[in-house]
């Protein structure tokens, strides 16, 4: 099992993780940075996350977080089966 390194700031908030992964070219890191923490219903959440790997990166920015927001059950309904439309 490969290690995961966790980095925290002075307030105890997680600011970085580095996960080591086995690949065909050897062991390589994937780094995740967390910042722009905001209080959401009494819990500090990072509103900006950047994931970096060997050949790229991805940034996620949250604009709004609503805990326990109501969700219409129809959003989880099974979609209608695919029907091919043949044009003449």
Image (tube, rainbow, N blue to C red):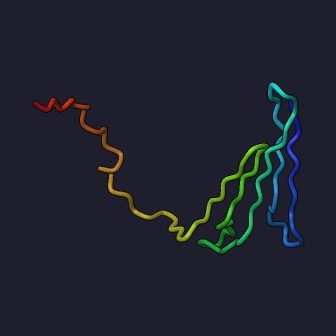
- Label tally: 0
Residue 13 image-quadrant placement: bottom right
Residue at 71% over, 72% down:
36
Which of 41 and 46 lies nearest the eye of the viewer? 46
- In this picture, residue 82 sits left or right of residue 17: left
Residue 2 rendering spot, x and y as whole percentages: 87, 34
- In this picture, residue 71 sits left or right of residue 37: left
Residue 39 image-quadrant placement: bottom right
Residue farthest front in this picture: 88
Which of 88 and 4 lies nearest the eye of the viewer? 88
Residue at 82% over, 52% down:
17
Residue farthest left in this picture: 88
Which of 9 and 52 lies nearest the eye of the viewer? 52
Residue farthest top in this picture: 24
Residue 10 rendering spot, x and y as whole percentages: 89, 71
Residue 59, relative to residue 56: is it above or below?
A: below
Residue 63, relative to residue 79: is it above or below?
A: below
Residue 27 rendering spot, x and y as whole percentages: 87, 33
Residue at 71% over, 52% down:
57
* Quadrant of the rendering where the N terminus is positioned: top right
Residue at 79% over, 45% down:
30
Residue 26 image-quadrant placement: top right
* Quadrant of the rendering where the C terminus is positioned: top left
- In this picture, residue 19 sits left or right of residue 62: right
């Amino acid at each position: 099992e490969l290690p995961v390194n966790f980095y925290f700031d002075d307030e105890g908030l997680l600011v970085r993780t580095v996960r080591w992964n086995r690949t065909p070219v050897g062991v390589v890191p994937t780094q995740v940075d967390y910042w722009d923490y905001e209080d959401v219903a009494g819990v500090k959440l990072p509103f900006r996350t950047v994931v970096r790997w060997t050949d790229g990166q991805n940034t996620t920015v949250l604009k709004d977080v609503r805990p326990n927001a109501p969700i219409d059950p129809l959003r989880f309904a099974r979609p209608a089966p695919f029907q091919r439309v043949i044009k003449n």
